[in-house]
Amino acid sequence: MRRNFDEQLNHLNESLIEMGGMVERAIADANRALVEQNVALAKEVIRTDDEVDHKEKEIESMCLKIILQQQPVAGDLRQISSVLKMTTDLERIGDHATDISEITLLLANRQYRKHLEHIPQMAEITAQMVAKSIDAFVKKDLDLANEVIAMDDIVDAIFMETRQELIRHIKEHAESSDQAIDLMMAAKYFERIGDHATNVAEWVVFSLTGMHKDSRIM
Amino acid sequence: MDAKIVIKDFNLYYGKKQAIEGFNLSIPRNEIFSLFGPAGSGITSLLRAMNRLSDLTPDLRVEGDILLDGKSIFAPDLSMTALRRRVGMVFDVPTPLPLSIFENIAYGPRLQSKKSKAALQDIAEQALRAAALWEDVKDRLQAPAMSLSGGQQQRLCIARVLALQPEVILLDRPCSGLDPISTAKIEESLIELKKNLTVVIAPHSTQQAGRIADRVAFMLLGKLIEDGTSEDVFMQPKDQRTNDYITGRFG
């Protein structure tokens, strides 16, 4: 029974894991390039974003093909519609990694006036959020998905702390305020990455329970 | 829920073999209700019991009750003809009478009471329009019904039932073997018809149930497994057996 369909679903999961891995790496590399002022790595992040975009299109096409051929219902329908929504968020995370790397290129020629302490923390947590939400999806682990959703509060708290510090820095070192504003933008992109990773986890919850943000979609 | 049909503690036996077991279900008025499940689940038996066509099967015995507008269809004083006029049935294979298109429709109303030719023509036009067949046949009403395509024959059978102005129409896999266009025409006419009557359909596929039914019930081996709105059952079935069946994991 439904061997072909199950193979298609497995293949879809594999592609999603691959896309998750690409995005996770983009977050880590964007962070490392920013912290180390590594221009080559920043350019690599920007270049690989095309691959993420391509992966998104490939997964969308797989989903539409499955809908067309299998007319899925119940858990199958929730799974496929969730993948469609998740890839949109993963793709946006890839875009933000590019945004951060563009800031890295902008800041490359001047030494930082401030030690970057919080940004790597945000990068590490958001990369974990992506990895865990994909893991939760594949393993159908509701607790893990909820854990990811809760992690966003930590990212938000770190962001607010970063913001306060940068405001203080601008007040005290007006001459490097342009650099502080660029770093503030980078921090904001990491905060947005956390939001998109949360969205991914919320679609995992929908896929498993039919509930999205505590309400029913249909 | 404003129930048109209520099935209560219903059991149906063919000789010693039980085909429907402990069945309880309410079917709301002016909706499309779909009974679905694998072959041998008792769906056809249940449909045939709803207008007592099952009485014609030798050795068949029922227990429990089926209420139509709150009154038992098994009441001794109930006229079988009146019941079958109120609850019409369309079968999986089109069964046109070997008469003209017009005579197929006029046959029932004429038996019911004496009517003028003009009145019958009016009834035929209305019934054929409601079954989405009028445009196909309006210029050849005297042609033999057998000259119609399979899909047209099935719509003629629906029109024939509608000519008697039923309150409920039972359809047992009415689109099996029909092409997608004929199927779509029948489905669209059913959606239109539910404004005036109650539709109970055994679909030829779960996809058809998903497309047109307001509510659905999943039957397995003569038992009701679960019922609910189509959205609930097809998006998030409560019972694992329903899930396994609709996702094709059965068996």
Image (spheres, coloured by chain):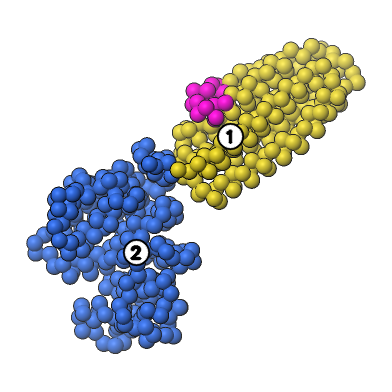
Above or below A218: residue B179:
below
Can see residue A193? Answer: no
Q: Would you say the magenta stretch is mainly helix, strand or loop?
A: helix
Q: Residues within 10 Å of mark 2 (few under 14, many from 20)?
A: some
Q: Secondary structure at mark 1?
A: helix
Dividing the picture into quarters, in which one does residue A105 lie? top right
Q: Which one of the lettered chains is coloured blue?
A: B
| Nearest to the observer: residue B94 or residue A149 | B94
Measuring from the top left, give residue A100's x and y in whole percent.
77, 27
Residue furthest out toward the left: B76
| Nearest to the observer: residue A22 or residue A69 | A69
| Nearest to the observer: residue B20 or residue A155 | B20
Relative horizontal placement of residue B132, taking residue B59 as reference (left or right) = right
Residue furthest out toward the right: A109
Magenta span contains residue B161: no
Q: Residue at x 42, y 82 (%)?
A: B138
Dividing the picture into quarters, in which one does residue A36 lie? top right
Magenta stretch: give its range. A135-150
Q: Which one of the lettered chains is coloured yellow?
A: A
Q: Which residue is mark 2?
A: B92
Q: Which residue is mark 1?
A: A13
Position of the C terminus of chain B, as image quadrant, is top left
The residue type indicated by label 2 comes to Asp
Above or below A42: residue B94:
below
Q: CA distance from mark 1 to mark 2?
A: 40 Å
Q: Residue at x 34, y 49 (%)?
A: B37
The residue type indicated by label 1 comes to Asn
Magenta span contains residue A146: yes
